[in-house]
Amino acid sequence: MGIENTHKLIVNCLPLNEGERRAFAKAARDVPQEFVGVEAHRGDMVWSAAVPEELRSQATAVIGNFPVSQAAQYTRLEWLQTFSAGVDAYICPGVLPRGTMVTNASGAYGQSVSEHMFATMWALMKNLNRYASNQRDHQWQDEGPVLSPEGGIALIIGVGDIGSHFAQLAQSVGMRTFGVRRHADVPAKGIEKMYGFERLETLLPLADVVAMAVPRSPQTHHLLNADRLGRLKSTAIVINAGRGDAIDPEALADALHNGRLHGAGLDVTEPEPLPAESPLWDEPHCLITPHVAGGNHLEKTSEHIIRIALTNVSRYAKQQELLNLVRY
């Protein structure tokens, strides 16, 4: 890769303990490293660290997510390792210096996001969100029939790390798992059958649960529109923890309001935050969480992110190819 260690500087924003700092210092070899992260922030939803202004112009590598509004100050940057899996804001033309390598934390969030989706599925199947509302209102009221995942079909749209993890959880409770991804010839753990997006219309009517974990792209914008939502069973559940704009919010609200879906679980919405006037807030069959499934509240997620970053710091110092390199 041709990286020279002379005059390099790594600015590390991770909320590390002392042992982890020593490991990063060792991994960096002769590359200087400034630690600006605060360990007390480790359990925060989103990690953040204030990079001193004088370091921004000196840094050749940053481990962390800095405000895009400050990007122009990182004039020497050649590598950015993000805390997040998504890097959309950084890879827009002109944001980072030309040729900057961007690596992400893909692979760190599969467990936390899939478990959140799985919990949402169960809550909707068993009407737990409605019972929680009844408890708040001091109402002792039966909310009627419930669903079971056993023998049902989970249609996972977007089978990356998160989708594969969810598929394995679905299989563990007796569900069949069909996956939809761009490259249908690439298998994934937990997926019984894989299909391309061209089969989506024929698969939707079969699904008892639709689990969405697609990346943001022009092709996935409003992927579930009114027509496709209309192909689902009235007993189906839709869960989205990928990108909010993958579902048309007006079409979803209409389907829920008119009883054409059993329920929807949304950890991501269009837009975010979801406006107070959105009808989705008032839908009793809609369970909304504020984009927290993939945060850093789970310690194992933090450990995964730190492991990825540590490996890449070592590779950076050794002039080796970096892991999770984003092509843009």
Image (spheres, grey):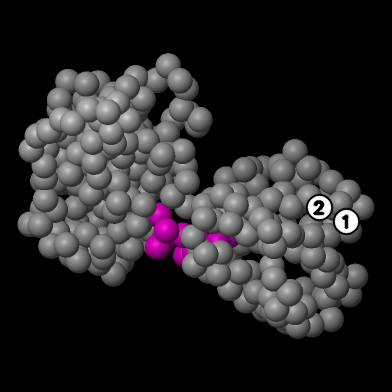
Up the image or down, 59 lies above or below 223; here it is below
Up the image or down, 173 lies above or below 314; here it is above
**Residue drawn at 75 percent across, 38 percent down:** 69
Q: Of the residues shown, which amino acid type is indicated by label 1?
A: Leu
What element does badge 1 sit on?
A: helix
Name the quadrant of the N terminus.
Answer: bottom right
Left or right position of 311 against 52 = left
**Residue drawn at 22 percent across, 28 percent down:** 139
Find residue 34 and report its horizontal and vertical position in percent. Answer: 83, 66
- Mark 1 sits on what residue? 55
Number of marks in the rendered image: 2
What element does badge 2 sit on?
A: loop
User: Is any atom of residue 119 visible in this view?
Assistant: yes
Choose between 202 and 37: the one closer to the eye.
37
Choose between 98 and 57: the one closer to the eye.
57
Residue range corresponding to the magenta coloring: 104-113
- Mark 2 sits on what residue? 51
